[in-house]
Image (cartoon, rainbow, N blue to C red):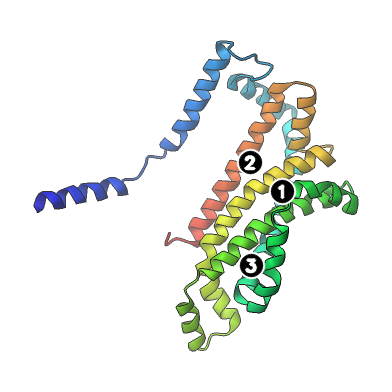
């Protein structure tokens, strides 16, 4: 019996053992080393796949010259504004749909009917309606962010224990307090899942919008160097987008840890 307990204790300790921080970088480092080896052996032409070392050197030169900064600024403005608008509206609409039976009956079919439409396909229409300026780009990003956020928020509200809601109402809480103190905290895990999913969607729509209807931005820069077959600078743009997505994800994870310390 004692041996059995010891085995269980060892298994629990193994499952609870924390992974070192450096472990997260091992996979990425291994991929970069393999990539560099492949390029150094000339298996693939540098025209089609430049080496990571060449991309870093070129990226540093573009950073010093200010080219990256000139293109990154407009992209951050577009994605920041579009993501914020889409997230705020999505959370509010999701709370309303989840809390009100009438709103659920009327609004949910509309959301699920429009959601499957590829938002990139709507971009030319938005340019026609709103012009080639910033409004069309911000709007398409906000629309792409809105749907995953509203659907996850709605699902999160529906997953809240009904006993907690009834208990709050029984003790005299009004609708606003029930939403603020019971429904919203219970739905936050699903809301953050939607926000993380929407982060990837917003990057995709940002690049598409800048490739179609912009003279600046990271997406426009990638398209420009792709047309010129300057793949090293093209990969610098891809690297910037990757770092932007990683930073986005880390910020959302940090915010989730602050708002949901019990998780």
Q: Residue at x 52, y 89 (%)?
A: 172
Whole-percent x, y for residue 10 in the image: 21, 47
Q: Residue at x 51, y 27 (%)?
A: 31
Q: Secondary structure at mark 3?
A: helix
Q: Are marks 1 and 2 in contact (CB under 8 Å)?
A: yes
Rendered view: 218 above or below 77: above
Image depth: mark 3 or mark 1 in front: 3
CA gap between label 3 and label 1 equals 21 Å
- Does residue 20 appear left or right of residue 88 in this picture? left
Q: Is residue 85 visible?
A: no
Disc 1 element: helix
Please provide percent x and percent y for residue 228. Answer: 79, 22
* Number of residues whose C-alpha sits closer than 10 Å to that of mark 2, classed few (under 14), some (14–19) or many (20 or more): some
Mark 2 or mark 3, which has the lower sequence index? 3
Give the mark, 1 or 2, whose residue is nearer the N terminus.
1
- The answer to which quarter of the image holds residue 50 is top right
The quarter of the rendered structure image containing the N terminus is bottom left
Residue that mark 3 sits on: 94
Q: Quadrant of residue 106?
A: bottom right
Q: How far is the residue under mark 2 from the one under mark 3?
A: 27 Å
> Disc number at residue 79?
1
Q: Is residue 157 above or below residue 84?
A: below
Residue on which the image places disc 2: 244
Viewer-nearest residue: 105 or 199: 105
Task: Report, in whole angstroms, how far the alpha carbon at label 1 lies from the one at label 2.
Answer: 10 Å
Q: Earlier in the sequence, mark 3 or mark 1?
A: 1
The answer to whether residue 248 is left or right of residue 14 is right
């Amino acid at each position: 019996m004692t041996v059995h307990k010891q085995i269980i204790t060892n298994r629990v300790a193994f499952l609870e053992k924390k992974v070192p921080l450096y472990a997260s970088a091992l996979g990425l480092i291994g991929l970069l080393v393999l990539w560099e080896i492949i390029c150094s052996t000339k298996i693939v032409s540098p025209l089609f796949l430049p080496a990571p070392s060449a991309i870093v050197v070129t990226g540093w030169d573009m950073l010093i010259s200010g080219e990256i900064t000139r293109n990154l600024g407009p992209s951050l403005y577009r994605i920041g504004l579009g993501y914020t608008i889409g997230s705020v509206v999505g959370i509010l609409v999701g709370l309303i749909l989840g809390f009100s039976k009438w709103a659920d009956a009327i609004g949910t079919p509309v959301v699920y009917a429009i959601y499957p439409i590829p938002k990139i396909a709507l971009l030319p229409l938005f340019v026609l309606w709103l012009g080639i300026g910033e409004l069309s780009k911000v709007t398409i990003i906000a629309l792409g962010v809105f749907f995953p956020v509203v659907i996850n928020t709605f699902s999160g509200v529906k997953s809240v224990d009904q006993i907690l809601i009834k208990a709050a109402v029984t003790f005299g809480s009004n609708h606003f307090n029930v939403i603020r103190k019971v429904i919203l905290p219970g739905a936050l895990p699903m809301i953050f899942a939607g926000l993380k999913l929407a982060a990837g969607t917003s990057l995709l729509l940002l690049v598409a919008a800048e490739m179609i209807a912009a003279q600046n931005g990271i997406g426009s820069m990638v398209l420009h160097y792709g047309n010129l077959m300057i793949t090293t600078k093209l990969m610098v743009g891809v690297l910037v987008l990757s770092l932007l997505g990683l930073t986005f994800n880390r910020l959302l994870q940090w915010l989730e840890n602050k708002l949901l310390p019990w998780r």
